Image: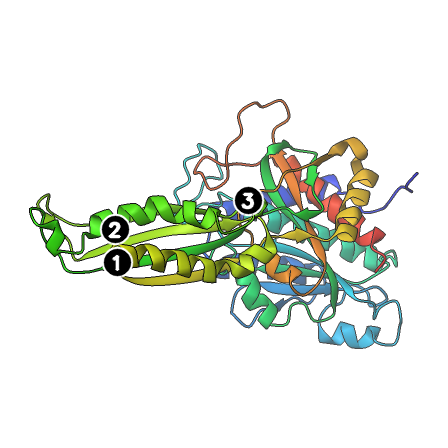
Amino acid sequence: MLPELPGRLTEPLRRELIAFRRDIHMHPELGNQEFRTTTAIKTRLEHAGLRPQVLTMGTGLICDILPGAGAGAGAEARGRAEDGAQESAPLLALRADIDALPIPDTKEVPYRSTVPGRAHACGHDVHTTVVLGAGLVLAELARAGALPRGVRLLFQPAEEVLPGGAADAVDCGVLDGVGSILAVHCDPRVDAGRIGLRAGPITSACDRLEVVLSGAGGHTARPHLTTDLVTAAAKLVTEAPALLARRVDARSGLALTWGRIESGHAPNVIPQRAELSGTLRCLDLPTWREAPDLVHAAIDELATLHRAKCELTYVRGVPPVVNEPSATALLREAMTARAGAAAVETTEQSLGGEDFSWYLEHVPGAMARLGVRPPGERRSRDLHQGDFDADESAITTGVELFTAAALLHRS
């Protein structure tokens, strides 16, 4: 039987957090342009007596909350805490991504985006509000002497920009002193008030391909005197995925999917250039590490077969998010303490990519799927769609999940 934990969200703070979420929802900012969002977070944390530090990239920030150091954060607070063994224990990081997407907001709600062509259609406004709210609650617990270990709030820019702002954040030192890291991601297939968990891989790797084929063009009456690039491109589109599928273990879930193909301007002219763009997704981390060599070999073989010159630009995206078992267990224990074991469901591995995986290359951690579907609603508004919205009771769930995890964190 787990003990009753402090850190419940008060009604005034709940209302404030909903207003905060709606404000940044109305003012979405794209990756590495999140200046207003960063300022809003920084201002609220400073109002709570904390000392957030903006990342050297200019957007995003970190803020430490240390036991035995009041609500102070930053170098001064860390210096005051150096002499205590408890305070010098590795920090638990709580990560939120703060950027929006370049798509229009099509919802008819009072807090609809005021910026044309931009929307928080992936729930990053909810993630940001959850970590902010957890920080405010944990700061109060630290002041009361009830925070057992230090916590770092991490507000990361540019999650939607390959290869993801997390890689830049790591280079900025956001993991210095961190022992483990937790995150949530909105899931419109899970009811609000619940979370989905999975130990091991929970997302997919995602890379981007740009292919340019070139060769001698000519008249369609004499294709034998040309490099028939339209045929070459068509063959590459259909045969490259099948060829790759035969060169990896089927359980790796390697999938090459094309999203763009362009070539030619006239029905009777064989063009001199063809362009293709697509994504490669992979469920398995070792196979993802081998993927660039495999893709280069397959595409070169097919281009050569059709006498086409080939230029392949392979853009590394993100590896899979692989949830570490003990961090996953911490999230399960925290959610059970707050809402009971029935509030946790097992989730499947997604084919979506998430740059939280870059942190897990350095420290153990886990990501939970935060339910945002109104209970009883049959229709799910999918992510990256203009009509996506979240049941705002999920904010309370996320805040209390993270506060419980911080109180139960042991190493």
Q: Is residue 387 left or right of residue 250?
A: left
Which residue sits at x=77%, y=49%?
A: 403
Which residue sits at x=46%, y=39%?
A: 112
Q: In the picture, which quadrant includes the C terminus? A: bottom right
Q: Position of residue 213 (x, y in %)?
A: 26, 58
Q: In terms of depth relative to the viewer, which is nearer, 307 or 44?
A: 307
Q: Position of residue 406 (x, y in %)?
A: 79, 54
* Image quarter of residue 138: bottom right
Question: How far is disc 3 from disc 2 in space, using C-alphas?
Answer: 26 Å
Q: Position of residue 373 (x, y in %)?
A: 60, 31
* Image quarter of residue 155: bottom right
**The residue under label 3 is which amino acid type?**
Ala
Say which mark, if any, is on residue 5: none
Q: In terms of depth relative to the viewer, which is nearer, 211 or 321?
A: 211
The residue that label 2 is drawn on is: 232
**The residue under label 2 is which amino acid type?**
Ala
Of the numbered discs 3 and 2, the one sitting upstream in the chain is 2
The residue that label 3 is drawn on is: 250
**Considering the numbered disc 2 on the image, is that residue within a helix, a strand or a loop?**
helix
**Considering the numbered disc 1 on the image, is that residue within a helix, a strand or a loop?**
strand
User: Decide: marks 1, 2 in contact (CB < 8 A)?
Assistant: yes
Q: Is residue 322 left or right of residue 411?
A: left
Whether residue 187 can be seen here: yes
**The residue under label 1 is which amino acid type?**
Leu
Question: How far is disc 1 from disc 2 in space, using C-alphas?
Answer: 8 Å
Whether residue 157 can be seen here: no
Of the numbered discs 3 and 1, the one sitting upstream in the chain is 1
The residue that label 1 is drawn on is: 213
